[in-house]
Amino acid sequence: MDYKTTVGIEIHCELKTNTKMFSHGTNGYGNTANSNITAIDLGYPGTLPILNRGAILLALRAALVLNCEINQQMYFDRKNYFYPDLPKGYQITQARTPIGIHGYVEIEVDGKPKKIGIHDIHIEEDTAKSAHSATSSLLDFNRAGVPLIEIVTEPDMNSPYEAMAYVEKLRELLLYADISDCKMEEGSMRCDVNVSVSKTEKLGTRTEIKNIGSISAIGLAIEKEVEHQIVVYEQGGTIQEETRRFDEKAQKTILMRVKETGNDYRYFPEPDIPMLVLTNEEIESVKKEIPVLPNERRKKYHEKGVSEINSNKLIQNRDLSDFLLTAPEELNLVLASNILLGDTLAYLNKNRKKITNTKLSMKKLTDVVKRLEEGSLTSKILKEIFNDLLETDLSIDEVIKNHGITQVNDTDSLNQVVKKVLLENQASVDDYHAGKERALKYLMGQIMKETKGGANPVLVNKLLIEELTK
Amino acid sequence: MENKLSREEVLHVARLARIQISDEKTLEKYQYQLKKLLDEIDKIKEVKNYDEDFLIAPVDHEAKPTKDETQEEITFQDVKKNAPHTKGNFIEVPVMIHE
């Protein structure tokens, strides 16, 4: 029998609050070292923690987004350990009454949905950030006390792929729900992975790989750790519970330390914070504030015929996806997403702008899509006038005019073009007579092409129908 | 019941506290002292109608979370007064052995 891989993941995410979990110090990444600190963050004697309402509501939102049952009566616990980045000597966390339990995140494996169980999600505080040299360690307390949620899965993943899919899905959810900015490279999302292999139904002894720096590294680290464990077992050895780290250069996991066990942390209830109660009303109001989540958006794109590739691209470009939330129901999302992900995205990336900082309104986009559908605007002309649509308040007609694309209003010359196009496209004429409405749009497009987009669409439409019904 | 902790137990506690015990005599003293402390704490178990909730939150009011607004920050100049060593804007401590 082959070895079965089992993976569980713990993720720490910093919450997007203004201030810290248990003090009024600013939560500001990248600020001058030790400029966002209070006496509480430094664990000065005589200080008492406060509770940040904003952080609690964001953690509650996370628990709801991850389909958890909510603990409406919570208290906090002290996790005791001695380290310079934690001057109180303990971290305030939630060991016994996590805010959310028994949740799940749904991923896709081989085209089928798979639920990854969330054991719990709890609130805690971050530690100070340390930098080490050969002779001393330097501490920055800006990070001390920043609100974190720790999300702990059940051991439900069975491959590196599933682990990566889970982290990607979780990240997407937390980003879209505005809970965390989830930047692994800045440490606002940190990932520890528990890995074991076993030939039987009983789970093998697990090792923990700490602080993996990217989603792809998570996959690689698991792959390498599984290889390592199998080699040990095959050589008759045993795996012991230990903490390892993944060395990306060496492409292998390296032993850091044999784990301290739960008892070593001497957890006990935090006596300085009274019981925290969440009311039904609070939970309901947080539910209402949750933005439209990716799965719901994907469903809508799918219904409207948007390709899976474009659908994923829209989800990756949040502000474009948000922009589409304001689209009228009748808007052709296939064309709209092509425009947004094509010329618009190229423009935005080049100019480092967000769509909300351009002059492209939903009305303008709707107008462009409608004209493309009618055939009264060609994609060639759209390309030519596109920057102006994004940069000016002018209407499409005005922009077209400014580009020297003059409208042909001369019935005689247009009639000649119409006749020419009909002669050249007998198949479409037949289609039209057979009742295929789309043929008209195609012919319209051909006429616009012939006149380099200059023909008056209303007039062309009239002449075309006249000629077809002769 | 033994009236002292084992050597290993004392060494384990010392490791958690990052304390180095200098000699055997001190170690032995701690074996007795720590056991005495633990026995004292164990007396809690003798309380009748033990109410765990009361121990968790001995006050009967609920927590009152506060607004997510910056207040009461202190400057690094203030911090420096309490930090034996600083370097630039950082607090400097002896090198940490392991992560």
Image: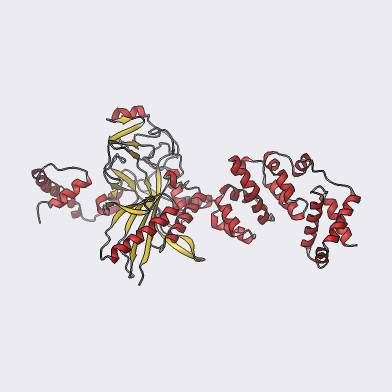
* Colouring scheme, one of rainbow, by chain, secondary structure, one colour: secondary structure
* Residue A379 visible, this orientation: yes
Q: Is residue A463 above or below residue A272?
A: below
Tell me the quarter of the picture where residue A235 sits: bottom left
Quadrant for the N terminus of chain A, please. Answer: bottom left
Residue that appears at 79% across and 49% down: A453
Number of marks present in the image shown: 0
Q: Position of residue A382 (x, y in %)?
A: 72, 47
Q: Is residue A307 above or below residue A187?
A: below
Residue that appears at 21% across and 55% down: B48
Furthest residue to the bottom?
A1
Q: Position of residue B8 (x, y in %)?
A: 15, 52
Furthest residue to the front?
A250
Q: Position of residue A43 (x, y in %)?
A: 31, 37
Residue that appears at 12% across and 51% down: B7
Q: Position of residue A396 (x, y in %)?
A: 75, 44
Q: Nearer the viewer, residue B43 or A105?
A: A105
